[in-house]
Image (cartoon, helix red, strand yellow):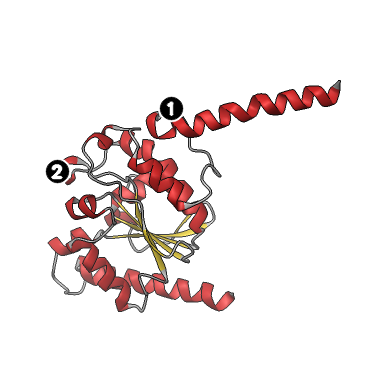
C-alpha cells in the first residue's frame, strides 16, 4: 500500500512540472528555478518566444549570449541595443567593439576566455534603462546561464547590471573597482563601454583611465584561478 502511495505521488508531481516549463515564456509568475534548463538552446528557444514582460512585443530577436559557455569570466551588461536586436548577438555595436578591445588589451580571447550576456534579453525601446519589473521577469534566464557557465568572475558592465543581478542601487561610480562577493563568485562592477565612449579622455582619473585599472584587476584575479587549477 505504501509503495502504491509513493508511486501515485510521483506521478502527480511529474505532470505539473512539464506544464510549468511550457508556461515559463508566457507567464512571469512562473519561477525559473535552478536546474530548469539543461542546455543553452532551451534558454534561447524560450527567450525568443518569451512574453514575461512587455519587451517581447517589440523585439526582433532575443539576445542571449556569446563566447565560451565554460568560461571562467562572464561579462554581464544592461540589455541589447539596435544592432544586438537585429543580430541576436550581445555587444556587437560600437560599445561591444570597445568591450572586445578592452578585454583583448589584457589578453582575453573573447571566444575562448569569456562568456557575454545581459540582464534583459530583449531591447528596451529607445535603448532606455530596463524597468525593475522587466529585469525581474528576465532574471531567471540569466541565473540559469550563470549556473551553467559557472564562472569564477563576473564583470558587471554598468550600474543597471549591478542592480539587476545583486539589487545594489548605489551606482557604478561608487562601486567600480571594488571586488564584491555574490553567491560565492568574485564580482567586479565596471563602467559600461557605452559610458566610456561618451567620455573619451584617457587622462589620469578619467573613466577610461579608471576602467584600465579595473580590467587589470580582473586579469590578475583570473590568472589566480588559472594558476590554482
**Alpha carbon separation for disc pair 2 and 1:** 27 Å
Q: Position of residue 101 (x, y in %)?
A: 25, 73
The 10 Å Cα crowd at callout 2, few under 14, some 14 to 19, many 20 or more, is few
Of callouts 2 and 1, the N-terminal one: 1
Query: Residue at the spot x=28%, y=69% of the render?
Result: 100
Q: Position of residue 24 (x, y in %)?
A: 44, 33
Specify whether residue 166 is in view. Answer: no
Which quadrant of the view contains residue 54? top left
Q: Position of residue 150 (x, y in %)?
A: 51, 58
Q: Quadrant of the N terminus?
A: top right
**Dots 2, 1 in contact, CB < 8 A:** no
The 10 Å Cα crowd at callout 1, few under 14, some 14 to 19, many 20 or more, is few
Residue of label 1: 29
Q: Quadrant of the C terminus?
A: bottom right
Please name whichever residue, 130 or 35, is drawn nearer the observer in this view of the structure: 35
Query: Residue at the spot x=31%, y=36% of the render?
Result: 134
Q: Secondary structure at mark 1?
A: loop
Residue 150, placed above or below residue 223: above
Residue of label 2: 126
Amino acid at each position: 500500500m505504501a509503495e502504491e502511495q509513493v508511486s501515485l505521488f510521483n506521478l502527480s508531481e511529474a505532470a505539473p512540472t512539464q506544464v510549468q516549463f511550457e508556461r515559463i515564456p508566457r507567464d512571469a509568475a512562473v519561477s525559473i528555478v535552478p536546474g530548469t534548463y539543461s542546455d543553452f538552446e532551451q534558454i534561447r528557444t524560450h527567450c525568443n518566444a518569451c512574453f514575461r514582460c512587455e519587451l517581447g512585443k517589440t523585439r526582433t530577436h532575443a539576445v542571449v549570449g556569446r563566447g565560451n559557455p565554460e568560461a571562467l569570466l562572464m561579462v554581464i551588461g544592461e540589455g541589447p541595443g539596435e544592432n544586438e536586436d537585429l543580430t541576436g548577438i550581445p555587444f556587437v555595436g560600437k560599445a561591444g567593439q570597445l568591450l572586445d578591445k578592452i578585454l583583448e588589451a589584457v589578453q582575453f580571447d573573447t571566444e575562448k576566455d569569456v562568456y557575454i550576456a545581459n540582464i534583459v534579453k530583449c531591447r528596451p525601446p529607445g535603448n532606455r534603462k530596463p524597468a525593475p519589473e522587466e529585469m525581474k521577469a528576465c532574471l531567471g534566464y540569466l541565473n540559469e546561464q550563470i549556473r551553467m557557465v559557472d564562472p569564477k568572475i563576473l564583470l558587471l558592465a554598468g550600474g543597471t547590471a549591478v542592480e539587476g543581478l545583486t539589487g545594489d542601487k548605489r551606482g557604478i561610480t561608487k562601486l567600480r573597482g571594488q571586488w564584491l562577493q555574490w553567491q560565492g563568485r568574485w564580482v567586479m562592477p565596471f563602467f559600461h563601454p557605452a559610458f566610456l565612449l561618451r567620455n573619451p579622455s584617457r587622462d589620469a582619473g578619467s573613466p577610461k583611465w579608471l576602467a584600465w585599472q579595473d580590467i587589470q584587476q580582473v586579469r590578475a584575479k583570473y590568472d589566480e584561478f588559472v594558476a590554482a587549477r
